[in-house]
Image: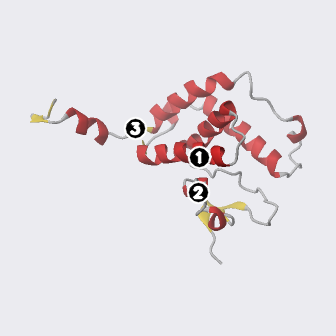
Amino acid sequence: MKLFGLFIDPYLYYYQIEMKTSKLLLRLQQDIETYKSKVKSNPDCLDENNKSVQCAVSRYNLQNFREILNLSPDEVHGDVDEEKLHDLENRVEGYFELHGPVDEEFKEFIKLICIYLTFIAVKPLHPPGIGFGDGTTVYQEGDIYFCTAKRLHIDEEYSLCRCCISQSIVD
């Protein structure tokens, strides 16, 4: 391949170009389209006052599912670190293997949501305001997200905390 009068190895050239977030969004939109007829609000979780972890996560996933479908690629800018993208995908796979039973369809849905949150929306993997049973939480101060549970789980095998944008709180 000749680029600017120089001969470039096409293999090296391909891997030096980073994926754009707009391209990643188009891929997510295409992949998540199959879930349109399957994703429904959990009737038990429609009440915003229901603060259970399951309902908070369910509402958050639904909100982000809708954002993926409605967001225009023209609205997102930046590059995707493909190494980090593959790491996140592998962590979701491993997490589901460890904490099975594995529902392939659900796993793939969660993987798409995690990719969106991490690389496009740049939001935490758990909804801000969520309170876990052990007293830990995810919260936001200005444009920064914090998670008081991150330090407890970051070293676990296939921890998704390593990919989450929330900052850890150290005592």
Question: What is the three-letter code of the residue carrying label 3?
Answer: Met
Which residue is denoted by mark 3 in the rendering? 19
Q: From the image, state whether disc 3 or disc 2 is nearer to you.
A: 2
Residue that appears at 63% across and 23% down = 33
At label 2, which amino acid type do we have? Glu
Q: Which residue is mark 1?
A: 94
Q: Position of residue 125 (x, y in %)?
A: 64, 50
Spatial CA span between label 3 and label 2:
27 Å
Residue beneath disc 2:
157
Eyeballing the image, is 118 above or below 46? below
Q: Is residue 75 left or right of 44 when viewed as pictured? A: left
**Which amino acid, mark 1?**
Gly
Identify the disc placed on residue 168.
Answer: none
Residue shown at 89% from the left, 35% from the top = 43
Q: Residues within 10 Å of mark 1 (few under 14, many from 20)?
A: some
Instruction: Tell us which disc is closer to us: 1 or 3.
Output: 1
